[in-house]
Image: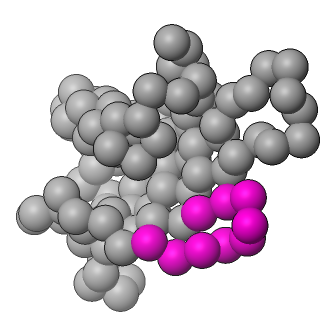
Amino acid sequence: MTFTKNFRSPTAEEWYLFLPSFRDPVTGGAAGKAIIHYNLYDTKHIFINTTIIFDDPELHDRKLHGLVYAIADEIVNRLVGYADTLLSVHSGANSYNAEYKQ
């Protein structure tokens, strides 16, 4: 798994996700992207909002739910670290939401 980083704004990042054997069917490029938005305005309950969007339709197959979950978990660990995170994964039938708390 490899990543390419693109800045969206001072409080958000966009990463393109490259996975072996998976790619965007339209462009032939990255299998998906991760958008990480840092909530810097509210200091009481700081969460990092992370959205992962998988564009390869193979990753939308229910049979690959475990793989999608494992990839998303690794993306959060590598790109966000151990910060409190609200995660939203968009992958067809494998879409889900999760909360990571220290």
Residue 34 part of the magenta segment: no
- Indicate whether 83 appears above or below 38: above
Q: Residue furthest bottom?
A: 27
In this rendered view, identify the residue nearer to me: 11 or 19. Answer: 11
| Residue drawn where x is 24% and y is 54% of the image | 58
39 displayed left or right of 5 = right
46 displayed left or right of 98 = right
Residue 10 part of the magenta segment: yes
Q: Position of residue 10 (x, y in %)?
A: 74, 67
Q: Quadrant of residue 63?
A: top left
Residue 34 visible from this viewpoint: yes
| Residue drawn where x is 79% and y is 20% of the image | 45
Q: Quadrant of residue 24?
A: bottom left
| Residue drawn where x is 54% and y is 66% of the image | 14
Q: Position of residue 12 (x, y in %)?
A: 67, 60
Q: Position of residue 53 (x, y in %)?
A: 48, 54
In this rendered view, identify the residue nearer to me: 83 or 55. Answer: 83
| Residue drawn where x is 40% and y is 56% of the image | 54
Q: Quadrant of residue 46?
A: top right
Which secondary structure dominates the residues rendered in magenta? strand
Q: Position of residue 99 (x, y in %)?
A: 56, 19
- Indicate whether 28 appears above or below 3: below
Q: Residue furthest left?
A: 21
In this rendered view, identify the residue nearer to me: 84 or 69. Answer: 84
- Indicate whether 55 appears above or below 77: below
Residue 68 visible from this viewpoint: no
Marks counted in the figure total: 0
User: Which stretch is magenta?
Assistant: 5-13
